Each structure stands twice: as C-alpha cells, then as structure tokens.
Image: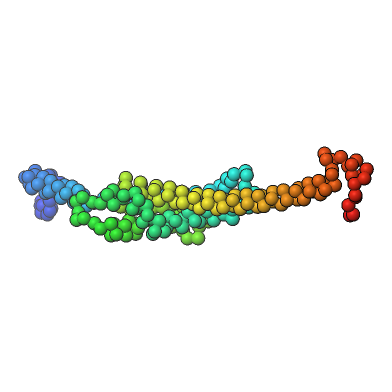
C-alpha cells in the first residue's frame, strides 16, 4: 500500500465562499460604510473648476478713409501687446471687479464673510496668462494666448474673464479713437490755415486787380490809358 498523503493546508475557493456567506452581514456593513464615507467626503470637498478663454492677434487695423496714411503710430502688434498688458494688470482687474459687482458673485455663503480686498487678491492669484497650453516659453506672438482661471464658481469665472477682455478691448479702442480724433483736429487746423493763406493771397490779387481797374479779366481799360504797373 502507498502511504496516504496528508491533506493540503490552506483554504480552497469553496471554503472562501462559505466564509463570505457566513460573514455576509459584516461584508455588507463594511462596504456600505466605505461608500458612505466616500460620498460624504466628495460632498464636503469644494470642487475646483478651470475656465479658459483664448485670444488671437488682430489681422489688420481698419482706419477711416478720410485719415491720411500714418495717422496713427499704432500697429496690430503694438495694440495686441497693449491688450495683453491690460489683461495682466492688477489695476485693470480691480476696476472690472468693482464695476461688475463681482464681490456678490464670488462670495461663498457657506463660509465667513470675505473682505473685498482679500477676495480680489485670491481671484488675481488664480488667473494666469500664457501663450500656449503646453507651457512652452518664448512662443511666437502670432499664436493664440490663453487666459486661465481656477476657482469654485464657474459661471462667475466665465463672466469675469469675458468682462476683462471686453473692457480691455474697449479701452484700447478708446485710446486709438482719441489719437485719431486729435490727428483729425490737427489735420483740420492745418487745412484751415492753408485756406486762410489762400484767401489772403486772393484778397491781395483782387486788390491789385481793383487798382488796375480789371473787371472780369478785361484788360482793355488798363491798356487804353491806365498807368501800367512796373514789374
């Protein structure tokens, strides 16, 4: 007779199922507690959203036809740089924040009241401007520029970024219009001075014609007996 082999130690799959069946209440209770803890944690943590708005440089500057060539020193590149500069300006963000009443749109009713200055500083630090989404440096100016913002109020964030861009564009347009208006006034004054000189010259010519008794380009009287001027 062959010697009998001792039974294998350990637990096989059937025994494992039997243990789960016997301990099903404990397994169910542990699973339920884990799910409740996960849901409670996700509800207690404030979600963080990311809002992005992109810009492209202007293709050309359209000026009124009445303006002479070179009426403005600005170029599409210089205007675009001014626009990007305003987007990054703290004073520009502060003006938009105050004029748009964003203190009411960003305040959290579940937390203690936040001072406007503190909220503004928090919003300012959450905004970044970069020239491409991959974080490369020294990227060409002709590529899109992105304005990113992180926070917990996505609707207010979208409105704030749009307001920043719209007000910046309006400021640039106002600056250009002021320059063009001054150029138009300067051109008009130059034209007025030129007309005054022409009128003075015409008056002098008419005075000479009157002294020579020339009427409607009729020089017969001057030739018949009038004294001829010495040229």
- The colour style of the image is rainbow
Q: Outermost residue, right direction?
A: 224
Q: Quadrant of the C terminus?
A: bottom right
Q: Position of residue 51 (x, y in %)?
A: 36, 49
Residue at figure coordinates x 67%, y 52% from the top left:
193
**Count of numbered marks:** 0
Near-viewer residue (44 or 213): 213
Residue at figure coordinates x 20%, y 54% from the top left:
111
Is 226 on the left or on the right of 62, as rendered? right
Near-viewer residue (163 or 19): 163
Residue at figure coordinates x 50%, y 60% from the top left:
138
Q: Position of residue 207 (x, y in %)?
A: 78, 48
Near-viewer residue (58 or 163): 163
Res 108 seen here: yes
Is 196 on the left or on the right of 186, as rendered? right
Q: Position of residue 15 (x, y in %)?
A: 11, 47
Res 142 seen here: no
Near-viewer residue (195 or 178): 195
Residue at figure coordinates x 89%, y 41% from the top left:
221
- Establish if 207 lies above or below 116: above
Q: Outermost residue, front direction?
A: 225
- Establish if 17 lies above or below 10: above
Q: Position of residue 181 (x, y in %)?
A: 56, 50
């Amino acid at each position: 007779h062959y010697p009998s082999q001792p039974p294998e130690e350990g637990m096989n799959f059937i025994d494992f199922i039997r243990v789960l069946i016997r301990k099903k209440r404990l397994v169910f209770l542990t699973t339920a507690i884990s799910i409740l803890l996960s849901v409670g944690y996700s509800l207690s943590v404030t979600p963080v959203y990311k809002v992005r708005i992109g810009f492209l440089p202007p293709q050309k500057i359209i000026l009124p036809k009445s303006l002479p060539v070179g009426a403005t020193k600005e170029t599409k590149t210089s205007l675009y740089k001014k626009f990007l500069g305003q987007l990054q300006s703290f004073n520009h963000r502060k003006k938009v924040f105050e004029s748009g009443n964003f203190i009411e749109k960003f305040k959290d009713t579940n937390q203690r009241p936040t001072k406007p200055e503190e909220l503004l500083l928090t919003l300012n630090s959450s905004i970044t401007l970069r020239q491409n989404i991959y974080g490369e440096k020294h990227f060409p100016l002709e590529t899109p520029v992105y304005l990113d913002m992180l926070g917990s109020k996505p609707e207010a964030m979208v409105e704030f970024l749009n307001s920043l861009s719209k007000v910046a564009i309006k400021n640039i347009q106002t600056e250009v219009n002021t320059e063009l208006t001054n150029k138009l006034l300067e051109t008009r004054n130059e034209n007025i001075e030129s007309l005054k000189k022409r009128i003075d010259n015409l008056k002098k010519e008419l005075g000479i014609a009157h002294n020579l008794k020339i009427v409607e380009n009729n020089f017969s009287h001057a030739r018949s007996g009038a004294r001829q001027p010495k040229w």
